[in-house]
Image (cartoon, helix red, strand yellow):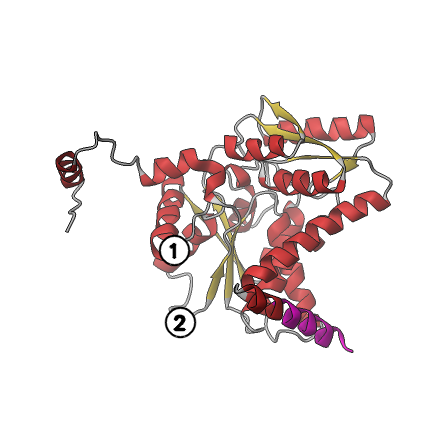
Amino acid sequence: MSIRENYLEICQNIADAAKQAGRRAEDITLVAVSKFVDEERIRLAHEAGAKIIACSSTGNAASSLAGNAAAAGFKTYIFVPERAPKGKVAQLMIFGANVISVKGNYEETFKMSAEAIEKYGWYNRNAAINPYLSEGKKTVALEIAEQLNWEMPDYLAISVGDGCTIAGVWKGFKDLYAIGFIDKLPRLISAQSYGCYPINRAIQENKPWEPMEENTIADSISVGVPRNADKALAAIRESNGIAVCVTDEEILAAQRLLGRTCGVFGEPAGVTGAAALKKACQEGLIEKDATVVSVVTGNGLKDVANAIKSAGEPLHIEPDLELMVKGFAERGVTVE
């Protein structure tokens, strides 16, 4: 059986399981692939003889690590910058991780984790240090290809922080192209906030990347010293991609747009790709008939403070219908 035939058989088995469970195939695929990737990372740590796994993170990568490590019986030490949203920190604590909230930015948090890992001999999961991360990230490309029936979009928009995800996705597409699963490669749209855009600045100015301050509500991509910058820049350039920066206000607008038109609730960093896509369309950077996939990389429930900032507060009233009607009228909302 060829590699392609084997993979297609796996996808069909997933689809059959989805039908039996009364769920969409893509839902099952997402869970199956994500679970496989995380379990694979834990397995590799076990093979390395590790008993403790550590990383620095703004929260998302740490949550995945802590949950799967807990299920596998590993002890974890997680370093997060103090600004990490409470929702993400809560996940880590529930999973039993030893969480160190560092009074500093992500770069300082990363350095502290590196020092601790070196001193105590913990297994290192950090981006650009652990080579298996890019292999895990490329499953994003595999899911996109399978769910689109192997018909590639013209563009793929994705938020960028450390650069690991965009580099891994590009590797995934190249692997699929090399073995004949797809017949073209999409152009990448690198999305960053103006509050922190070292990778996009390097693309726009055609020069090596330089550190930047971290000043954006999109905490997951607020990375002033990206650890996978070289791989990310290589991927963007090789794909003839474009770099689009957006403001925090445009990010919040994209959060509302996705919620109110697609029923998708993404955190600020997760919807930055959508914000960049909208801006690219407005500026004529993308052809009107182009096909585009925008990847949402994080759930909005992990940062409810910024979600409320984006959507506004609910109507707070006493249990009185007249007050309800009056309150809605003040907001320009009718009950009819």
Q: Secondary structure at mark 2?
A: loop
Task: Name the main secondary structure of what is drawn in magenta.
Answer: helix
Residue displayed at 54% across by 39% down: 220
Is residue 185 in view from this perspective?
A: no
Q: Secondary structure at mark 1?
A: helix
Number of numbered discs: 2
- Where is 38 relative to 312, above or below? below
- What residue would you read off at disc 2? 289
Residue displayed at 55% across by 41% down: 198
Question: In the rendered structure, which amino acid carries the disc numbered 2?
Answer: Asp
Categorize mark 2 by other alpha carbons within 10 Å: few (<14), some (14-19), many (20+).
Answer: few
- What residue would you read off at disc 1? 278
- Where is 200 relative to 97, above or below? below
Instruction: Tell me the magenta residue range.
Output: 1-14
- Where is 87 relative to 241, above or below? above
Which one is in front, 322 or 165? Answer: 322
Question: In the rendered structure, which amino acid carries the disc numbered 1?
Answer: Lys
In the rendered view of the protein, which quadrant contains the N terminus? bottom right
- Locate residue 130: give its quadrant: top right
- The mark that comes first in sequence, 2 or 1, is 1
135 with respect to 262 (left or right)? right
Residue displayed at 58% across by 24% down: 104
166 with respect to 302 (left or right)? right
